[in-house]
Image: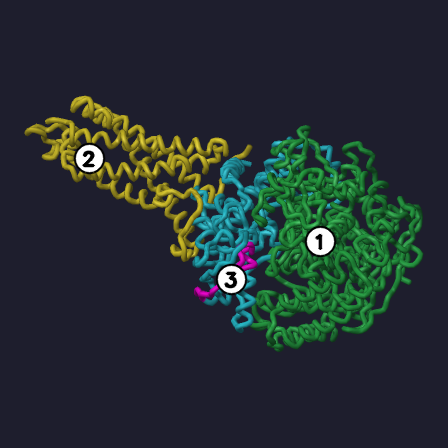
Amino acid sequence: MSKKINLTLKVWRQKNCKSPGAFEVYEAKGIDTDMSFLEMLDVVNERLTKENIDPISFDHDCREGICGTCGSVVNGQAHGPVKGTTLCQLHMRNFTDGQLIVIEPFRAKAFPVINDLAVDRSSFDRIIQSGGFISIKTGQAPDAHSLPVLKGRSDSAMDAAQCIGCGACVAACPNAAAMLFVSAKVYHLNILPQGEPELKTRTINMVKQMDKEGFGNCSNEYECEAACPKEISVSHIARLNQQHRKSNFT
Amino acid sequence: MLDSKIPPGAMSDKWTDFKFHAKLVNPANKRKYKVIVVGTGLAGASAAASLSELGYQVESFFFQDSPRRAHSIAAQGGINAAKNYPNDGDSIKRLFYDTVKGGDFRSREANVHRLAEVSNSIIDQCVAQGVPFAREYSGYLDNRSFGGAQVSRTFYARGQTGQQLLLGAYQALMKEVSKGSIKLHSRTEMLDLVVIDGVARGIITRNLVTGLIESHMGDAVVLGTGGYGNVFYLSTNAKGSNVTATWRAHKKGAFFANPCFTQIHPTCIPVHGDYQSKLTLMSESLRNDGRVWVPKTPGDQRKPTDIPEAERDYFLERKYPSFGNLVPRDIASRNAKEQCDAGRGVGASGQAVYLDLADSIKRLGKETIKQRYGNLIDMYQKIVDDNPYETPMMIYPAVHYTMGGLWVDYNLMSNLPGLFVIGEANFSDHGANRLGASALMQGLADGYFVLPYTISDYLAKNKPVDPKLKEHAEFKKCEKDVANYIQKLLSIKGKRTVDDFHRQLGKLLWDKCGMARTEAGLKEALVQIPKIREEFWKDVNVLGSGEEFNQALERAGRVADFLEFGELLVKDALDRAESCGGHFREEYQTPEGEALRRDDLYSYVAAWQFNGVGQVPTLHKEELKFEEVHLAQRSYK
Amino acid sequence: MSFQIFDLSRSITKKQTVAITGLMLISFVLVHLAGNLFIFDGPKPFNEYAEHLERFGIFKKIAEWALFLVFLIHIERVTSLVVQNIRAAGGLKRYAVDNSRGPRSLATRLMPFTGTFLFLYLICHLYDFAWANDQGIRSMINGKSLGLYGLVVNSFKNPIHCWLYVVAMYCLCLHLTHGVESFFQTFGIQDSRFTLLVRKLSRVFALMIMIAYSSIPLYVLYILKI
């Protein structure tokens, strides 16, 4: 059953990537526990607007946990305290009356802050551009049934392909490494027979681009897996390490 | 009367003939043409990638931070194709027939046939791109059945088909970006269409991070900007989904067709509070294994598990024995509303019906159900805090998709030469109701297999645009208009928030122009909407400036457009004095309460011409002729 | 198949360099341990073993230099990775609340510190035993030089030295707990089915190394009568 709770928010406010940011404290009163976290922020923003205070900027779009747009660090945890959940699917029943909630943007050199909680994750797009695709042109592709794919392989590819590209893995990694994101994409394509011809160049190029973007290095602490809203396994990172090792020999 | 430019000849030869007769651009000349593509959903991304592969210069614009965020990503259930892999009697003809019938005879036959023809190529293309569709142990693709069809023609990737298809298109887009032939403009919103001498020549955009307003010129402008479901405020659309691009094109002369055809999806999580920001869809595939029911006695307060079988009314199975729970969306939605209106609704608000998986769990086991719908059930559990394995889910219809959109001819070109509209943004293929798993099909069909041919035909007939045209006064004027408009929004400094107005408009439209519409209600809405709009321009409060990242400003512009568009939506609904598909006018129903079409009077596409805000728009009609599928009362009994 | 000179600066290659040098150091740790355990047999076998090693002459020198190089590479690569990581995360103080949800353990967090401590201890250790005069005053037991054996026994009879050694071995244990497990992950000889097993085994291995090494000073201090 839903009830009303009062919260104190400590929110990171920052004009843009060049100016320094700071925390501001806001009260969030009468929050319905059935609200989602973003709906709670909506309510706070409505109030701030009425008081002529600039509302808090935060990225969001689908609000059903699939587009990967939303995401902040809530009390030190990317996407908040519930496992396998994006911020938009986090509900206020997971908080208690009177609780202090600290909200910060995903922090990483490769994710510069745009405004308040919104960050620039275009580095992920550039990693995909470096090889996260299968080079087939639109046109007469062979009949879908001409290439059977082992169910196990297809399912594993799907497990990896579920990544929503939200960047929580980077935010949660103590080194701001993007290995979970990169490995999931590499593996999705590498394990399928369609993706095999480009396996080596894809693997090498995506890792190169990842380094170039200024992400950190994986030190096998597995914080990424714990923060991933799609619970993508770190075994993908092991597979990337392996394929990268093998791809050095062409 | 509008000319739809349908090629002559037999239905099944039209597209082949068109492709043969279409003019081609010499490969060496292609790079001299630039195409502007707005939107990176299934239609926009696939179009941009395919056009770039052909050799055109492409510039892609989207308001999200990455092309992969477009709302196509949220489609759950699947994508149709006439592959007939299960050998259950499917064919191009049947898919075509089902889609025309499902659309309640308000779509253009030739377009639908083309859609059915290219559907198979989509599956081939996506598999080649590495889309991990569900497979059987044989290694071959699995199919399932979906609402409104009696064959299993739906391909799916768990409950995330839209995501996987969009990632496929996104990856194709990224592949072209890496070659340098597509330029991406992220966090950039189209705010105006530039029309010079009646031809679409470019767009005006605002960079959402810096606020910079810019002109972009091209040989053709393609809008793949999605539907306008958010005019209802609460819908299953993403928060950012808007009508701005299509509406502003409409204001520049493009006709808006059939805006009253909106789809209400039957299986969404019910509304639970006035703070609610959006509604969440539960894939319709749940109806494959879930039974929809309400208690027979109105106001029954018992727990659903305590209500014995004899006191439950499985109303869809009772009324439609041959389709049962799998009737098309409009019918399922309307019946749910009917039950709730009769007081048999369940849940705290009484605005919900049960979707019960218990029988399927008994028959197939919990594991199988978990495999099929695990992610949906998890999502439901997170939002509602209830366990669907033990108690039935509660569902209620919600605005989901809009069949209406900018008017296009067979070539997907609007009445403005050079302006092409694809995917949900156009009106063409779904008539008055869309069948499940057809939106993904249409988006990709338009982008991968239709637009590349039709746009080439258009470009081949026109010389590449002179770069000097960028200096044309019209570009400067449009930039200035956009800047002034933004300034106007910022200068009101009233008392109410943007969302406040949006909620007010949405509620009005849902009440008066939602699942069931009446003449009196629509007329009432036509009085109310201008008032809300006037109030908005007097009392909205948008803080901050236009030269920075300002989400309230973004929303204000979109809501301002919804406030204008809503009026057209209602006007169209009032004008169409018949019931068909998603458009249900209470005055026009059969004795059993089914939609009553009036083919003699309304067998046309209503394409509206803009005459100014608050002015009566001019109606243009496109006659719909049904040569292959004969007009008949839809029956799913 | 042609051999391509691959880019050593790529993040994964760097990590794999750390892993492979780590593996070499582990094998050294094992060989070294085997030799050390001769101490339980008394002075003669222990000193003979040490002298036996000396007989390799030039090869021993080469092995020592190679080992030194491995150490150097291990440390240099790790330093470079750590610096990059701090930079990527935008400094050491990242979030206002430090509240990680994952399995990040003490061993993992302390990796650079246990490593640094081990390195410093190693210098002391070399100074103590390898570079010391094994016929000198520190090797005398009951007025008679017992060579390296004497050196070791005398040192560990000092409780501070003894316990410093044990602490160093605890650091080694922590370092290996994460290091061994990481080796499998970084080299990609991993499968999600074995993740937990690998984690447990690396803990057991690290613990055994610690016990085996620490047994020597503890034996000398508390059990050995001279």
In terms of depth relative to the viewer, which is nearer, A44 or A84? A44
Vertical position of residue A26 compared to residue B160: above or below: below
Q: Secondary structure at mark 1?
A: strand
State the residue at coordinates (76%, 67%).
B525
Q: Amino acid at mark 2?
A: Phe
Q: Colour of chain C?
A: yellow
| Secondary structure at numbered mark 3 | strand
**Camera-side mark, 1 or 3:** 3
Q: Nearer the viewer, residue B615 or B341?
A: B341
Q: Colour of chain A?
A: cyan
How far is mark 2 from mark 3, CA to CA?
Answer: 70 Å
**What span is colored magenta in the figure?**
A20-40
- Indicate the position of residue B108 as horizontal and vertical percent values: 86, 52
Measuring from the top left, give residue A141's x and y in whole percent: 74, 40
On the same chain, marks 2 and 1? The answer is: no
Tag 3, which chain? Answer: A
Mark sitting on residue A30: 3
For disc 2, the marked residue is: C129
Residue of label 1: B400
Q: Residue at x 71, y 41 (%)?
A: B311
User: x, y (%) of residue B631?
Assistant: 91, 49
Give whichever of C222, C216 is nearer the camera.
Answer: C222
Asked whether residue C200 is drawn in magenta, I would say no
Q: Is residue A23 magenta?
A: yes
Kindly indicate which chain is depicted in green in the rendered structure: B
Residue B142, picture quadrant: top right
Residue farthest left in this picture? C143
